[in-house]
Image (cartoon, rainbow, N blue to C red):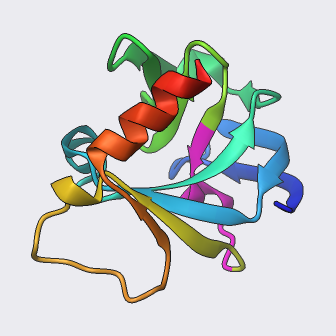
């Protein structure tokens, strides 16, 4: 059973605050090319469900990065904040904005797109692009 707790975090400059009442206590890494370009490395994210409050909307930029998802970032400092699935309104928020150190790292996605110059030593579930897309298409 996945555990949840309330999470609250901010971008680097503090202009945008994300409040997630049902933040998971696990995190995942996405190695897709889009996430790596967006974050200058893998996107380390925490599932936060659909009940997410964002304070500082006037400093938030959101854009559609695909037909199925949006990404949000701070206009002032550029911090990558979240990836949101349009169909389900599920937020995957950058783990580092929460300043939390007790997350359990349990999943890596798009592992077939991961470059060879880095590797995590944590034992995790690993999913290729095909596996992620199959799981996504069956859940929508």
Residue 73 picture location, percent across and down: 45, 32
- Residue in the image at 38% along x and 45% along y: 131
59 to 129, vertically: above or below = above
Q: Is residue 81 left or right of residue 24?
A: left
Residue 13 picture location, percent across and down: 52, 48
Is residue 130 magenta-colored?
no
81 to 110, vertically: above or below = above
Q: Is residue 93 left or right of residue 62?
A: right
Q: Quick one: quadrant of the N terminus?
A: bottom right
Q: Quadrant of residue 16?
A: top right
Determine the residue located farthest toward the left in the rendered image. 116
89 vs 58, nearest the viewer: 89
Is residue 99 magenta-colored?
yes
76 vs 20, nearest the viewer: 20
The span shown in magenta is 92-101
Q: Is residue 104 left or right of residue 138?
A: right
Q: Is residue 9 left or right of residue 73?
A: right
- Residue in the image at 18% along x and 53% along y: 113
Q: Quick one: quadrant of the C terminus?
A: top right
Q: How many numbered marks, from 0 up?
A: 0
Residue 49 picture location, percent across and down: 75, 36
Is residue 15 visible in the rendered image? The answer is: no
- Residue in the image at 45% along x and 20% along y: 69
- Residue in the image at 50% along x and 75% along y: 124
Residue 29 picture location, percent across and down: 43, 60
Q: Quadrant of residue 59?
A: top right
117 vs 109, nearest the viewer: 109
Q: Quadrant of residue 35?
A: top left
């Amino acid at each position: 059973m996945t555990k949840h707790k309330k999470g609250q975090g901010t971008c680097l400059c503090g202009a945008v605050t994300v409040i997630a009442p049902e933040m998971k206590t696990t995190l995942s890494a996405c190695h897709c090319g889009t996430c790596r370009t967006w974050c200058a490395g893998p996107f380390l994210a925490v599932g936060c469900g659909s009940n997410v409050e964002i304070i500082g909307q006037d400093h938030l930029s959101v854009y559609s990065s695909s037909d199925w998802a949006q990404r949000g970032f701070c206009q002032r400092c550029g911090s990558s904040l979240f990836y949101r699935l349009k169909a389900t309104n599920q937020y995957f928020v950058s783990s580092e904005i929460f300043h939390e150190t007790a997350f359990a790292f349990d999943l890596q996605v798009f592992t077939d797109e991961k470059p060879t110059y880095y590797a995590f030593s944590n034992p995790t579930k690993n999913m290729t692009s095909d596996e992620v897309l199959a799981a996504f298409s069956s859940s929508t």
